[in-house]
Amino acid sequence: MSEARETGGHSGDVTGVRLIAERIDVDLAGRRVLGGLDLLLESGEPVALTGPSGSGKTVLCLVLGRALRPTRGRIWVERAGAAQDDYDSGLILQTHGLVAGLTAEENVALPLQARALERDEIAARTAGALSDVGLGKNAARPVDELSGGERQRVGIARALALEPTVLVADEPTSELDPGNRERVLTLLTGMARRGRVVAIASDDPEVVAACGSVVTLDRGLLSGRPPRSAANR
């Protein structure tokens, strides 16, 4: 068992959160990638997003993580009975998305600086997140010098440091050894238990088994029933 803390962030617990996506369509290059999706994802346990290659998992991650605007439909968060269209999110990319030439800590700190946080808070969050993923001793190393698995963990630390209301991860364990896979799953599960919505796109059986529910995509459509349907609320 790894010794990663079940925090997924360094702030206190937050009120239970629900992320609602209603009638989501995404058209890219003249092709319907996602069609008419209704989802209701709740904090408490991570949700696995599964499906064959080309099913739309990565696009759904980008949409839920607010990196891609849907062609049609609405996504919002409910917390303590209040609806928020403008919610804070963290996105873990399968391709890492790190800035070459910067160190691990500089990559993690970059989005925190964009939020205009105090310098001391940025330093504390950055150090804490890198420590959580087992890279505290590599903080000053340029990401170009890190292995693929280490770069993946820097990308995970970057999202955790944001302490987002919604965290979406696209294949976050694809390059990790068993010990670090368990470490990362512990962090993501802990984040969900502390009141965040956590969605993980993965076909790794161990990752799926660690999640509380499963949403399966097939050619941009939901296969079977999602955990709940926002359209039927």
Image (spheres, rainbow, N blue to C red):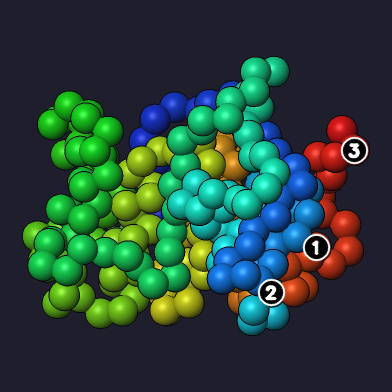
Q: Which residue is mark 3?
A: 232
Front residue of 85/155: it is 85
Considering every residue shown, the one lying at the far front of the view is 30
Q: Is residue 191 visible?
A: no
Q: Residue type at mark 1: give it.
A: Leu
The percent position of residue 222, horizontal first and vertical second, equals: 80, 63
Q: Is residue 149 left or right of residue 12?
A: left
Q: CA distance from mark 2 to mark 1?
A: 9 Å
Q: Earlier in the sequence, mark 1 or mark 3?
A: 1
| Quarter of image, res 98 | bottom left
Q: Which residue is mark 1?
A: 222
The percent position of residue 23, horizontal first and vertical second, equals: 77, 47
Q: Residue type at mark 3: give it.
A: Asn
Q: Earlier in the sequence, mark 2 or mark 1?
A: 2
* Residue 43 numbered tag: none
Rendered view: 110 above or below 205: above
Q: Residue type at mark 2: give it.
A: Ser
